[in-house]
Image: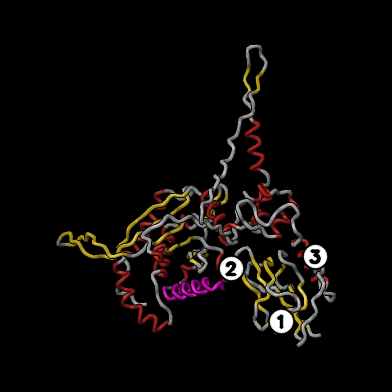
Amino acid sequence: MAQVELIMPKMGESVAEATIIKWLKNEGDKIALDEPVLEIATDKVDSEIPSPFEGFLAKKLFNEGDVVQVGKAVALISTEAVAAAPAAPQTPAAPATATATQTATAAVAAVSSAPAAELGKTGDSGRFYSPLVRNIAKEEGITMAELETIAGSGMHGRVTKNDILGYLPHKGKLHTQVQEQVAATAVSANGNGSTTVAAPAQTQAPAAKPAIPLMPGDEIVEMDRMRKLIADHMVMSKQTSPHVTSYVEADVTNLVQWRDRIKKDFEKREGEKITFTPVFIEAVVRAIKDFPGVNVSVDGQKIIMRKNINIGMAAALPTGNLIVPVIKNADRMNLVGLTKSVNDLANRARGNKLQPDEIQGGTFTITNVGSFGNVMGTPIINQPQVAILAVGAIRKRPAVLETPQGDVIAIRHMMFLSLSYDHRVVDGMLGGSFLRRIADYLEQFDANREI
């Protein structure tokens, strides 16, 4: 019987493994060409693995929840006309013809995918932990409570392998500091020369979660996994960074008139619609070059100055969830290149076709609250970045213009820009100046510019 292997595909330059979330086919089921066989998750995105062959699922080599290395076979597919009889559940094993190197790799994968006996897949916050992360935590004696305190760099704050390995040198420090604070004693001399030790200081108990009453007609809807990750990431960001938000108003009349003039010819020539987003990104990139202090990350007491300018653009999904694809090296693109990148990433984000590498590595994020008709917003910083820009809706309003003949009132296209920034490293002067510079570039846009 002819059998072929279904291989765990390479999903990005920095992705070496993935977790099997759900098998979409059972052993013996018929599989059409390019039909999804299983769902997988990396630390960044979820995706499906389609079958490159037509036939029947002969055998699953891994179970749901297992971590599989890129390039390893996850299933065997029979290409014969008769379905293979379902095989009895077995412990996945490396093929008998494996080389010594393949056998070693399989052994590492087996250890990595071993389930953690005392750690659940999710913590109290709802954050998902992969089997690999839970296994490392178990081996290093990290409790779920301590695991919940680790800041994650994965999608929506998920803890990656690198995050937990980077945490190990600091393991238990927070718990030790609390113990030391509680056990701290005040020693003072009394009248007879002896010492009196004060009782340990009482620590304030964590605030209890309020009870949520249910009312007639209420419906309880369980958060999906992505929404749980988003919620956890937002809470983590607010706990990590002291947020400050500044606002400016910009007159973008020249920009609106320019786009109205060129959009039809641009679409006819490039086969792409041009929106305001690539122009906003271009202005942000120019301002970052003027104020590189906002293109940084914070690592404890150290500031990491980013060399690359990678702009994330928040995109709403049909499910209502949010994802942030990243335009890498945006400073090296002209307006046409930015337009094509923006449209491509936005379209594939809505179709759940982004690759893991395309939603990581951002150094600054833009979110367009104007697309929902909002005039301004107070966005939450996308960790580990230190600033995020919200662009509001463009509205026609009367405005005062200064002319050589005196002040006049005219109808202008106006918009608000708001910048939330991490006050640990971005002070009001830097944040306000950077935001004002973005507005200046938009207001000074050349209405006669050719593209």
User: Is label 3 in a helix, a strand or a loop?
Assistant: helix
Q: CA distance from mark 3 to mark 2?
A: 27 Å
The residue under label 2 is 357
The residue under label 3 is 107
Q: Horizontally, is 172 left or right of 308 in the view?
A: right
Disc nearer the start of the sequence (1/3):
1
**Front residue of this view, candidates 167 and 264:** 264
The label nearer to you, 2 versus 1, is: 1
Q: Residue sitting at 58 percent across and 71 percent down?
A: 355
The quadrant in which the N terminus is found is bottom right
Q: Which mark is residue 30?
A: 1
The quadrant in which the C terminus is found is bottom left
**Residue 436 among magenta residues:** no
Amino acid beneath label 2: Asp
Amino acid beneath label 1: Lys
Q: Residue sitting at 61 percent across and 56 percent down?
A: 127
Q: Which residues are magenta?
A: 335-356
Residue 170 lies, in percent from the top left, at 66, 47
Q: Which mark is residue 311?
A: none
Residue 393 lies, in percent from the top left, at 36, 64
User: Is label 1 in a helix, a strand or a loop?
Assistant: strand
**Residue 351 among magenta residues:** yes
Residue 24 lies, in percent from the top left, at 68, 73
Residue 12 lies in what quarter of the image? Answer: bottom right
Q: CA distance from mark 2 to mark 1?
A: 32 Å
**Front residue of this view, candidates 289 and 398:** 398
Would you say the residues marked 1 and 3 are in contact, meaning their CB atoms lie under 8 Å apart? no
Residue at the extreme right: 96
Crowd tier of the residue under label 3, counting other residues whose Cα lies within 10 Å: few below 14, some 14–19, many 20 or above: some
Crowd tier of the residue under label 1, counting other residues whose Cα lies within 10 Å: few below 14, some 14–19, many 20 or above: many
